[in-house]
Amino acid sequence: MSATRLLVLGVVRLHGQAHGYLVGSELESWEAGQWAGLRSGSIYHALRQLAKEGLLDTSEVHEWPGRVDYAINDKGEAEFLGLLRSALRVPDRRPELLNAALVLLPALPEEEVIALLKERVRVLEDERAQIMVTAQEGRRPRNVTELFALRAAQAAGEAAWIRDLIGRLERGEEPA
């Protein structure tokens, strides 16, 4: 899964119909270039690829030669929701996926978001426990042991932050 794919589908969905410049402007307003590594070329490539895969419908704007508008279709909607749910539920070492999912949270009912995030916490806790078991097996060089410690701390830190987010969502608080 790519954050670009999720974000582009999400922005087109948000606007109902959008052209490349609009998608890029929206993502720029979210500062997605900093946290997702997006560049305008990758946005246009993603739009064309998503249309080629049948996830976006296209229409040419006769008043603007060369401009193509994109609209999400049922297949694209299913892909978007599947990607969003997966990005919330399944921890990934690429932080841009969770970042993308967080900016698109309003696309899902809050109860579903909370359930998906609780599943993510369970997976992170299981991952941390497995890392700790693996770290204690056999003798390893110190640098390898430190790598295991870092991975365990990252899983624990993310789980703690997600639990805090769940608490804020359950209390109906506005995002921090």
Image: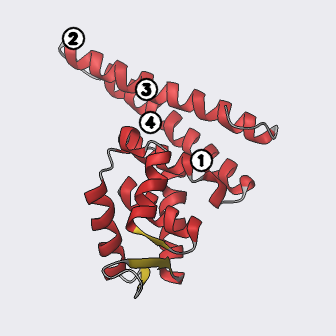
Mark 3 or mark 4: which is in front?
3
Q: Where residue 32 sits: x, y (%)?
A: 42, 45
Residue type pointed to by label 2: Arg
25 w.r.t. 45: above or below: above
Q: Which residue is mark 4?
A: 127
Is disc 1 placed on a helix, strand or loop? helix
Q: Between marks 1 and 3, how big is the CA–CA gap?
A: 17 Å
Say if mark 1 contacts mark 3, CB within 8 Å: no
Q: Amino acid at mark 3?
A: Gln
Direction from residue 80 to residue 33 in the image, left or right: left
For the N terminus, the image quarter is bottom left
Residue 142 tag number: 2
Q: How is the image coloured?
A: secondary structure
- The numbered mark, 1 or 3, whose residue comes first in the sequence reads 1
Q: Residue at x 58, y 65 (%)?
A: 14
Circle 1 residue: 119
Task: Measuring from the top left, give residue 121's x and y in whole percent.
Answer: 57, 39
Figure quadrant of residue 171 = top right
- What is the three-letter code of the residue carrying label 1? Glu
Say what amino acid the circle numbered 4 marks: Glu
Work out whether mark 2 precedes mark 3 in sequence or the reverse, and give the earlier one: 2
Residue 168 as seen in the image, left or right of residue 96: right
C-alpha gap between disc 2 and disc 1: 33 Å
Q: Which of 72/134 is in front?
A: 72
